[in-house]
Image (spheres, rainbow, N blue to C red):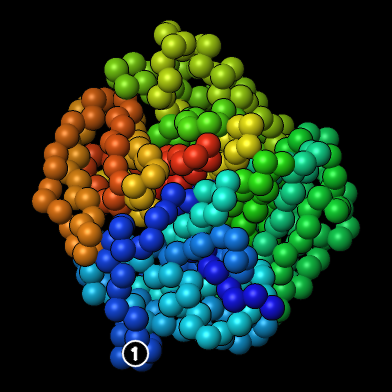
């Protein structure tokens, strides 16, 4: 067995590619102590994808809009095998080594983070040779989870991870769609997931040579938090958590780094869904690019380059999109490159307050993208994290109506706007890329 090296990621849709030097160069390492039973927890997030691979260094990035206290727990094989209390600043980094101590555990680990305040979240970041990774932690989820965008073509490995953080066993039913429409895979129709454990399914061994896959996951008994982990032929990977279906999906960027983006839309309902795709450019021009119909229980891909050529100025590189549908669907952004892969779920809400956790590192490049889908200028106030985990003085900027605005950064940040915006960030380092959504602190 190997010593666990964890990956945690903050809520809001993440991906599996990291940009990190030692924690000391990024933000404050919070005080680590034994859990305090007197702390009342207001928010709990579940991190369904952690690594126990010595080739990848991982850290849990935690953030809140004020100094926080949190308890981080690692359940495995039916019991909690490691637990730490952290806190003291709005931003903090906890390494896997500090979290696990002398605990030895094999692969397929997940974690739970309990925060003292509601305005908070966590992200797992990991890096290794040719690997940059982040994946979102999620709250207890919907009755039906949607996951889409994975592939089992030659050279692509795909895992479905089912994390049961609760003390009762769970049973899940999974419906699978691909470019071949519904996939009759009886193995996934009823799966048991032991209490306080993570079950991993090798999708390639069940459904080989599929270009795009989508999963609809229900919990007839108990609850799970699902995620996908994709590894490319070049060795890089991406991970992303499930979402609930919605009728609006925001993407503040559509590609970047060494990747080309593909929008993946999935309709798990028994009825058609008509949808529109609007583009938002830095100059404030809004274009209706695409209209289409998603047939019942299908999944489809739309290359971002096919959308770009429809722009009034196809040379525009940074642009965001909004997908609107007349019935609930799910939408994801998948990025691929020669040796690179990245992924994130769309943002189903615009919000006036956001946390961005994860950007950092002297050898990485990160850009936070803000999309203003409104009809008036948005005034945004941001505070970047300091080296000690505090907050630097506030900065203000304006985002024109119907536009996207990029902020280069090596730090996490908190953003507050006078009207709803959407926020996500993209990072790249040594030919690898990560897509990660921001953490919405309030709904529009």
Give the x, y percent position of residue 425.
39, 42
Q: Where 105 sits versus 132, above or below? A: below
Give the x, y percent position of residue 340.
60, 38
Residue lying farthest left?
A: 393
Q: Where 264 sits versus 29, above or below? A: above
Res 368 → quadrant: top left
Q: Where 372 sits versus 341, above or below? A: above
Give the x, y percent position of residue 70.
35, 76
Image side of residue 229 versus residue 414, left or right: right
Q: Residue at x 27, y 66 (%)?
A: 28
On-image quarter of the N terminus = bottom right
Name the residue nearer the viewer: 101 or 164.
Answer: 101
Circle 1: element type: loop
- Asked whether residue 253 appears in the rendered view, the answer is yes
Res 267 → quadrant: top right
| Residue picked out by circle 1 | 36
Image side of residue 190 versus residue 382, left or right: right
Give the x, y percent position of residue 230.
67, 49
Image side of residue 313 versus residue 224, left or right: left
Res 194 → quadrant: bottom right
Residue lying farthest bottom?
A: 37
Q: Where 195 sits versus 280, above or below? A: below
Name the residue nearer the viewer: 180 or 153.
Answer: 153
- Asked whether residue 246 appears in the rendered view, the answer is no
Q: Residues within 10 Å of mark 1 (few under 14, many from 20)?
A: few
Q: Residue at x 27, y 72 (%)?
A: 68
């Amino acid at each position: 067995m190997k010593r666990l090296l964890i990956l945690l990621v903050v809520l809001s849709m993440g991906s599996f590619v990291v940009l990190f030097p030692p924690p000391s160069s990024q933000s404050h390492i919070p005080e680590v102590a034994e859990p305090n039973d007197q702390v009342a927890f207001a928010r709990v997030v579940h991190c369904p994808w952690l690594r126990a691979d010595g080739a990848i260094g991982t850290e849990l990035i935690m953030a809140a809009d004020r100094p926080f206290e949190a308890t981080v727990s690692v359940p495995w094989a039916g019991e909690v095998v490691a637990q730490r209390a952290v806190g003291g600043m709005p931003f903090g980094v906890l390494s896997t080594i500090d979290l696990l101590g002398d605990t030895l555990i094999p692969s397929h680990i997940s974690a739970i983070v309990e925060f003292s305040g509601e305005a908070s979240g966590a992200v797992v970041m990991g890096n290794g040779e040719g690997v940059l990774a982040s994946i979102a932690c999620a709250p207890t989820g919907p009755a039906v989870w949607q996951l889409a965008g994975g592939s089992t073509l030659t050279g692509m490995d795909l895992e479905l991870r089912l994390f049961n953080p609760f003390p009762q066993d769970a049973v899940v039913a999974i419906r699978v769609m691909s470019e071949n429409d519904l996939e009759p895979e009886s193995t996934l129709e009823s799966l048991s997931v032991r209490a306080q454990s993570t079950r991993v399914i090798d999708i390639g061994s069940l459904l080989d040579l599929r270009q795009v896959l989508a999963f609809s996951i229900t919990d007839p008994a108990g609850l799970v938090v699902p995620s996908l982990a994709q590894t490319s032929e070049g060795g890089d990977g991406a991970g992303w958590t499930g979402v609930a279906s919605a009728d609006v999906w925001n993407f503040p960027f559509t590609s970047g780094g060494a990747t080309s983006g593909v929008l993946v839309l999935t309709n798990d309902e028994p009825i058609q869904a008509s949808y529109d795709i609007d583009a938002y450019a830095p100059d404030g021009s809004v274009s209706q690019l695409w209209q289409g119909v998603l047939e019942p229980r299908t999944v489809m891909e739309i290359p971002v380059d096919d959308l770009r050529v429809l722009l009034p100025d196809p040379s525009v590189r940074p642009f965001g999109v909004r997908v609107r549908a007349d019935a609930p669907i799910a939408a994801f952004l998948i990025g691929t490159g020669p040796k690179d892969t990245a992924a994130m779920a769309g943002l189903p809400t615009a919000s006036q307050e956001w946390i961005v956790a994860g950007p950092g590192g002297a050898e990485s490049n990160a850009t936070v993208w803000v999309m203003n889908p409104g009809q008036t200028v948005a005034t945004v106030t941001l505070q970047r994290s300091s080296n000690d985990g505090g907050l630097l003085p506030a900065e203000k900027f304006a985002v024109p109506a119907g536009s996207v605005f990029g902020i280069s950064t090596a730090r996490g940040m908190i953003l507050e706007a006078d009207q709803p915006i959407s926020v996500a960030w993209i990072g790249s380092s040594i030919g690898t890329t990560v897509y990660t959504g921001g953490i919405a602190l309030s709904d529009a």
